[in-house]
Image (spheres, rainbow, N blue to C red):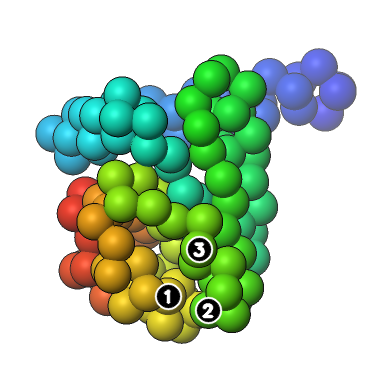
Amino acid sequence: MSHLSRAREVFDIELAALRKVRAQLDDAFACAVEVVVAALQRRGKIVIVGIGKSGNVGAKIAATLTSTGSTSVVLNSVDALHGDVGVVNDGDVILALSYSGESEELLNLLPALKRFSVKIITMTGGAKSSLAKHSDVVL
């Protein structure tokens, strides 16, 4: 197979994946956008939490949001339990990323986050997971 043929095959795979995600967009997506916009209008920020690869993806999301003028920070879930949760303020939005929705580090962080008046948006593959059950919006 030529490099050109392989590149086209990869694009076809990615296009199919985008179509699948597009088909899954529902009212939860619109709700998540409204929650984020409202927080940013009140001068709140988007606090992104995730472990492992999800944390890496979260760091990229935070960098992109910040570069487009939306205040965003990454909160390391482990460090948060040792004082870094002080970065969170009432009115912020927590964007929690976890494929399983059962990451122990994120679940242990929830009680500390719930002390604040924040909305939690979760992106997960586990719509019925423990993390999803403690979230305001699940994607």
**Label 1: which secondary element:** helix
Q: Residues within 10 Å of mark 1 (few under 14, many from 20)?
A: some
Q: Residues within 10 Å of mark 3 (few under 14, many from 20)?
A: few
Mark sitting earlier along the chain (2/3): 2
Instruction: Read off the residue under disc 2.
Output: 81
Instruction: Read off the residue under disc 3.
Output: 86
Q: Residue 123 in the image: state x and y as whole percent.
A: 37, 51
Left or right placement of residue 72 versus residue 4 in this view: left
Q: Residue 107 in the image: state x and y as whole percent.
A: 38, 78
Mark sitting earlier along the chain (3/1): 3
Callout 1–callout 2 Cβ contact below 8 Å = yes
Q: Is residue 18 visible?
A: yes
Left or right placement of residue 26 versus residue 120 in this view: left
In the displayed image of the protein, which residue is found farthest to the right? 2
**Label 3: which secondary element:** helix
Q: Residue 58 in the image: state x and y as whole percent.
A: 57, 48
Instruction: Read off the residue under disc 1.
Output: 109
Residue drawn at (37%, 74%), measured in percent from left and top?
Answer: 112
Q: Nearer the viewer, mark 3 or mark 1?
A: 3
Residue drawn at (58%, 67%), measured in percent from left and top?
Answer: 84
Q: Residue 85 in the image: state x and y as whole percent.
A: 50, 66
